[in-house]
Amino acid sequence: MLAIDRPETQYVLSGELSIAYQVFGHGTCDLLYVPGIISHLELVWEDSDSSAFLRALGQHFRVIIFDKRGQGMSDRIEGATTLEERIDDLRAVMEAVDSQSATLFGLSEGGPVCLLFAATYPKKVERLILFGSMAKFWGSDDYPHSPRLEKVLEPLISNWGKGNFVAMAGPKGGFDPSHSQVLSKWERMACSPSGVRKFMLANDLIDVRPILRNVLQDTLVIQRRHDKLVRRGNGRYLADHIPNATYLELPTTSHMPQFEDSVEVIETMVRFVKASRLGRSEYIEDKKLSTALFTDIVGSTEKLIQMGDQAWRKALDQHDAIATPLVKQFRGRIVKNTGDGLLAVFDGPVRALQCALALVQALEAIGLPIRAGLHVGEVVNRGDDVTGIAVNIAARVMEKAGSGKVLMTRTLKDLTGGSEMTFASIGEHELKGFSEHFELFSPHTGLG
């Protein structure tokens, strides 16, 4: 086997932040390793088990690893971070190393990031491997597989940097003292206690259950039976709800793949990648997870009658002159003008929501009050047009909104974790043409 030297840490800009990454290995397939709660590109190579695991991966793949924003060698951040920003980081790193498509290997909380990325950018993801991961980070009445935030947060923060966390994530019997010292340093260097608090609070809003059915790539879910940090019910839930998932439960303990049966983990990953390349289930590449935004001008017929054709046409020109650059600013695409409104699609729910709020404010200022509805789901591209149930739902949600209001479905709300937005439920509503009821939400922000 060819030797794999310790790689150089490099940087790529994702927005205004520098994301640290490394690339190494001899394989022909790209493996993008998405970290969990803590990461540090430099210190990971100082632990013998961790470096051995990475070098072993490099014998089979071209491995791409990175520090998530706010940790390790990447830029620190103010406040929390959204899933949307984190998938932007994945895309930036892939572009930096000229990776057109890759297998995503998501550890722990990196799993939901991988799932959202795979549904949003299906052409960039060959397959998924999820290790000790979850669909929802903290437990709730309808998700009993994880502990609740309030039971874990304060003990975690008060003991951060002392090795308690990595001890819980370790193998049966624990680590020897020298090993514990290295891993305790890893905790401290990855993130401060206040930084971890921000991440844990943001993780309270991680919930990708609504989009699991949109992840169509072959997926391998690896779960260790006695994992104390992520209980086995999490892995089972993922495998039961991702359409093309295979579940593997190992009779071991550590939350981190580099300990205990790491050789078996790597062999399983290699077999899975080879098998799925030979018999990969095809999915329609024109489908992708998108956020649909519908808007219309409130009372447009009355305004037309009051203003007359010529003045109304000028008002619509003003509308378009404001809406077009705003949608572009939030990285959306206007699909069509509906006469007195628009349909736009976005690759991120937070950006779509921010755009809707900005449109409401800007158009209100010129005397054109609008209402807006949003939903995130599978959208099918048909040339320049789009179709799909998500588009129809967004239109029906808009119909429930009052003047100057933005409404969205729970599906969208659950994907805005870390955005620091708050929401008020307006209850469950029947949407025209749909038999099920939808809980709708209104955002509370500084925009009014």
Image (spheres, grey):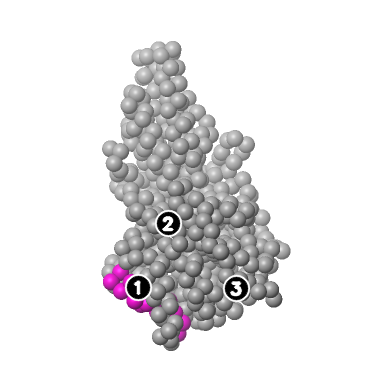
Q: Which residue is mark 3?
A: 55
Find residue 161 and name its label: 1
In the picture shown, does residue 440 fall above or below 126? above
Q: Earlier in the sequence, mark 3 or mark 1?
A: 3
Pick whichever, 436 or 187, lies toward us. Answer: 187
The percent coordinates of residue 57 (x first, y second) are: 61, 71
Residue 272 or residue 31, whichever sits in front: 31
- Residue at point 54%, 55% (across, down): 93
Query: Circle 1 sits in a helix, a strand or a loop, which is it?
Result: loop
Q: Give the magenta-colored segment's residue range.
A: 157-172
Q: Amino acid at mark 2?
A: Asp
Q: Nearer the viewer, mark 3 or mark 2?
A: 2
- Specify which label sits upstream in the sequence, 3 or 2: 3
Q: Residue at x 50, y 81 (%)?
A: 252
How would you rate the neighbour count of disc 2 (Cα within 10 Å): few for under 14, some for 14-19, many for 20 or more? Answer: some
Q: Mark 3 near mark 2, Cβ–Cβ under 8 Å?
A: no
Give x and y (percent) for residue 440.
36, 46
Q: Is residue 283 left or right of residue 183?
A: right
- Which type of secondary structure does the marked residue at label 2 adopt? loop
The label on residue 75 is 2
101 in magenta: no
68 or 394, nearer to the observer: 68
